[in-house]
Image (cartoon, rainbow, N blue to C red):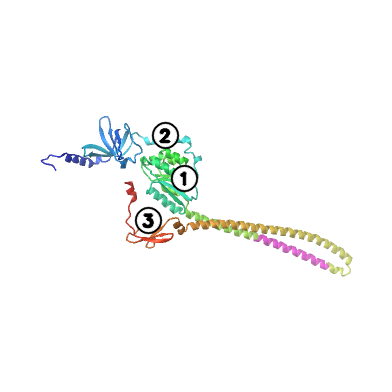
Amino acid sequence: MMINNIWTISQLVSYIKNELTNNITLKNISIQGEIGNFTNHYSGHWYFTLKDKDALINCAMFKGYNQHCLFIPKNGDKLIVNGSVNVFEKQGQLQLIVTSMKEDGEGNFYIQFEKTKKKLEPLGYFDDKYKKPIPEFPNEIAIITGANTAALQDVLTTITNRWPIVKTTEIHALVQGQQAIESIVSAIKKAGRTTADVIILARGGGSIDDLWCFNDENIAKAIFECEIPIITGIGHEIDFTIADLVADYRAPTPTAAATKATPNYKEVLNTINKLENLIIQTINNDINRHYQLLDYFNNKLVNYRNVVNNYQIEINNLQKLNALNLKKKSDLYIQNILNKEKILALSIKSLIKHNDDYLRNSLYLLNKSLDDILQKNKITLSKSIDLLDSYSPLKTLQRGYVVTSQNNKIIKSIKDIDYLENLETRFVDGIITSKPIKEINYYKSSRK
């Protein structure tokens, strides 16, 4: 307290500090200057000065902020920093608490982007002929993104809704800051050693500073050399990085990347049903066509028998004429008839043999065609049954998933939980009952 309007040092410094920290103008300002006396303290904090030709100010950038910086500054660098003016009371020292920094100079990010792009382009990194096709029906998808992030949840939700039978492998990586480049490169190499059919490299939206690590040539090299096709979903639709240029497919968002990587199982089932109906219709048409062919040959055989019967009747009539003393004439006539009959019999016999051979061959081809069609149909139906079986809830439970319900309603979101009622969690081999506890926002906790 003041005595006779005399201030203590602590009172004065504290008053000055309060005045500065409560000044809106000085709370979030951008400062341009040259860095000096830089110290990277073992605690992780950075201490340095910023100066111009006429003045100097002490600065501190604490670990919670500098770990998101894309570079480590050095003495002599010209910077633009953001921060707030404060007073270090122990030394009565005016200082700037820096929250972010970037190298000075207009268009610096664009210049660096174009420089990296120009370096990699002759190496074929962006050439379409090296881009690998994205599989239509993946069995396994590797997901590279930050742990416990909104981007990860968006990707997993989209995959589950579109293609629930696929296996997902999460590979967590830093997606911002100095250490992100090495972390992402390591994650890509690790994903390349899995049995995944496709890899999703995702990161939610952010500033150009936040996304800058994806412009690094080491990440570009890892994507280019990976033998498994990679889909990128980095930032928002307007964001574009070197990683997007090298990737086998660039999606505008993490959700769009998951959509590209998976088919819609409802559309697949619809296609299977249409194919099944087409196969059945084709088989029925083939069977009916062969039955019509059999009827045709049966009718021809009946007509040949009628011709033979007519000749037999004519012979019988001639034999009656022979009984009326017309033997000579009738014998000659009969002989002609017999010759005709013999020729006709040979012709009919040859024709019947030809038709029998054709009929046997037709029956053989019919049976073989039916066997082939039925065999293909069995294989198609077996695959359809296996696919439908894989959609069974029990199959999902056998792969390690569980279903949680409350009051006989499946819980799809944490927002649906009634914290006064018990939860029932179904495993493949039983059900457990548990008491829900108010949720904790792990995402915000991890960000701090």
User: Which of marks 2 and 1 precedes in the sequence?
Assistant: 2
- Is 6 part of what is drawn in magenta? no
Residue 252, given in percent of the width and then of the height, sits at: 42, 45
Residue denoted by label 2 = 115
Q: Amino acid at mark 3?
A: Ser
Q: Position of residue 37 (x, y in %)?
A: 29, 33
Q: Earlier in the sequence, mark 3 or mark 1?
A: 1
Which label belongs to residue 413? 3
For label 1, the residue is: 193
User: For the stretch drawn in magenta, what is the main secondary structure?
Assistant: helix
Q: Amino acid at mark 2?
A: Lys
Residue at x 26%, y 41% (from the top left corner): 27
Q: Nearer the viewer, mark 3 or mark 1?
A: 1
In the structure shown, which secondary structural element does the residue marked by tag 1 occupy?
A: loop
Residue closer to the observer: 61 or 211: 61
Name the image quarter holding the N terminus: top left
Q: Nearer the viewer, mark 1 or mark 2?
A: 1
Q: Nearer the viewer, residue 226 or 372?
A: 226
